[in-house]
């Protein structure tokens, strides 16, 4: 199928092909209900809505094409504008160059600042559940006397924008915040999945500059003229792609959790091959941390004071995330790894505001609060 020339465009034929896909969703839900008692997710919390959500997500990601998903979900800016209006606020948008923008949840605040870099396999936009999740964290980290500013990076999506353009955009966001007066010691970054992959790219570029990309805004930290970023939280970071370079093979959890995660092993490989189709051996460590040399991140502690990583018990990437923390991030003394029991890739976003997600959410909030209170 030829790709649309612009994001969100979809031919009439492709729209018609969506009809049977959408009509089959009730059948997927019914099968989820019938097989629920034998599901690992039922064993964990016996939540019908959660099982339905996981089944339907897995089905839609496998059945619909990237242009169809992008058409269904809309653009990040449109979703943000609608979300802001529903919450009785006005859009606050910063155009930061490189084709990217910052979408603020609430007023601009530069004294205590969270930058959210969202996931979505570099193909999906910012959508309502992501904004609900980070807004929940924002409200609970802040209080009546000391609220927190939060901006979402709206970066370019594949196939219209490709590596290393998103890296340029993430650097532009950080540079923009520093220029606006944000202190690195009052900045914490939240990221999930591909967004966490992009954060790792930012750290990699600072440590190992790419000549074709402008100087990293984090370089002064390596030179000792700027303190490190206060903290980075990575939720289910996309650290392994299973591509053609490197000696790393997929761990047993790719097979163990293939049927349990909403992002199947084959889907993860498909996304990697479509998102990074022309990556050279030299570029590989920037986008796939699992194959980076063992000393690649040795100086990362000069860039960030504290790192929190959460990985899900039932996600295919689990073991690669754990290994990334134990080996690549070993130089970070204030590193905290949380294995979320009963969870899939993307949790606790999928469980935000529910009883089963409360425990992990409280750990994240406490960690962010501690960062601002130090």
Image (cartoon, grey):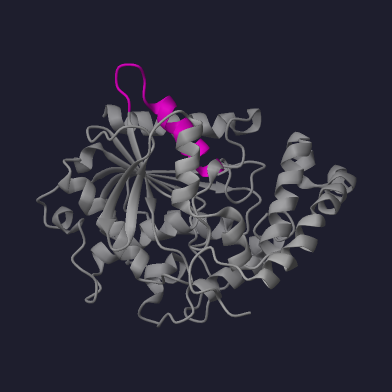
The location of residue 39, given as percent across then percent down, is 81, 47
Q: How many marks?
A: 0
Q: Is residue 144 magenta?
A: yes
325 in relation to 347, above or below: below
231 to the left or right of 317: left
The location of residue 84, given as percent across then percent down, is 45, 36
Q: Is residue 42 visible?
A: yes
Decide which of 103, 169 is in the foreground and name it.
Answer: 103
Decide which of 223, 67 is in the foreground and name it.
Answer: 67
Q: Residue furthest front?
A: 12
Report which quarter residue 319 is drawn in.
Answer: bottom right
Q: Residue furthest right?
A: 34
Quadrant (top left/top right/bottom left/bottom right) for the N terminus:
bottom right
353 to the left or right of 194: right
108 to the left or right of 338: left
Residue drawn at (14%, 55%) of the image: 220
346 in relation to 90, above or below: below
The region drawn magenta spans 129-147
Report which quarter residue 2 is drawn in.
Answer: bottom right
The location of residue 74, given as percent across then percent down, is 54, 54
Q: Is residue 223 magenta?
A: no
Decide which of 215, 254 is in the foreground and name it.
Answer: 215
Quadrant (top left/top right/bottom left/bottom right) for the C terminus:
top left
Residue drawn at (23%, 36%) of the image: 110
Residue drawn at (43%, 25%) of the image: 140
Q: Is residue 328 visible?
A: no
């Amino acid at each position: 199928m030829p790709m649309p020339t612009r994001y969100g465009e979809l031919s009439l034929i492709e729209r018609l092909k969506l009809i049977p896909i959408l009509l089959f969703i009730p059948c997927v839900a019914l099968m989820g209900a019938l097989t629920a008692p034998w599901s690992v997710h039922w064993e964990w919390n016996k939540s019908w809505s959660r099982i339905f959500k996981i089944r339907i997500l897995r089905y839609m990601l496998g059945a619909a094409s990237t242009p169809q998903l992008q058409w269904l979900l809309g653009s990040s800016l449109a979703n943000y504008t609608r979300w802001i209006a529903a919450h009785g606020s006005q859009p606050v948008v910063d155009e930061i160059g490189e084709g990217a923008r910052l979408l603020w949840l609430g007023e601009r605040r530069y004294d205590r600042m969270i930058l959210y870099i969202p996931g979505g396999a570099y193909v999906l936009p910012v959508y309502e559940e992501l904004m609900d999740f980070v807004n929940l964290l924002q409200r609970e980290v802040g209080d009546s006397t000391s609220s927190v500013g939060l901006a979402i990076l709206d970066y370019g999506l594949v196939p219209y924008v490709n590596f290393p353009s998103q890296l340029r955009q993430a650097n532009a966001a950080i540079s923009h915040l520093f220029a606006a007066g944000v202190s690195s010691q009052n900045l914490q970054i939240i990221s999930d999945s591909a967004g966490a992959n992009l954060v790792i790219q930012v750290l990699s570029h600072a440590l190992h500059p790419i000549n074709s990309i402008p100087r990293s805004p984090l370089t002064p930290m390596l030179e000792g003229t700027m303190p490190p970023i206060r903290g980075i939280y990575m939720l289910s970071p996309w650290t392994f792609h299973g591509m053609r370079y490197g000696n790393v093979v997929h761990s047993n959890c790719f097979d163990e959790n293939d049927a349990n995660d909403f992002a199947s092993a084959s889907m993860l490989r498909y996304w990697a091959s479509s998102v990074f189709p022309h990556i050279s051996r030299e570029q590989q460590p920037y986008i796939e941390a699992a194959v980076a040399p063992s000393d690649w991140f040795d100086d990362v502690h000069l860039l960030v004071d504290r790192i929190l990583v959460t990985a899900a018990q039932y996600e295919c990437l689990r073991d690669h995330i754990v290994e990334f923390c134990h080996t690549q991030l070993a130089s970070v003394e204030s590193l905290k790894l949380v294995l979320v029991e009963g969870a899939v890739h993307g949790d606790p976003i999928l469980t935000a505001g529910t009883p089963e997600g409360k425990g992990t959410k409280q750990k994240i909030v406490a960690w962010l609060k501690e960062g601002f209170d130090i």
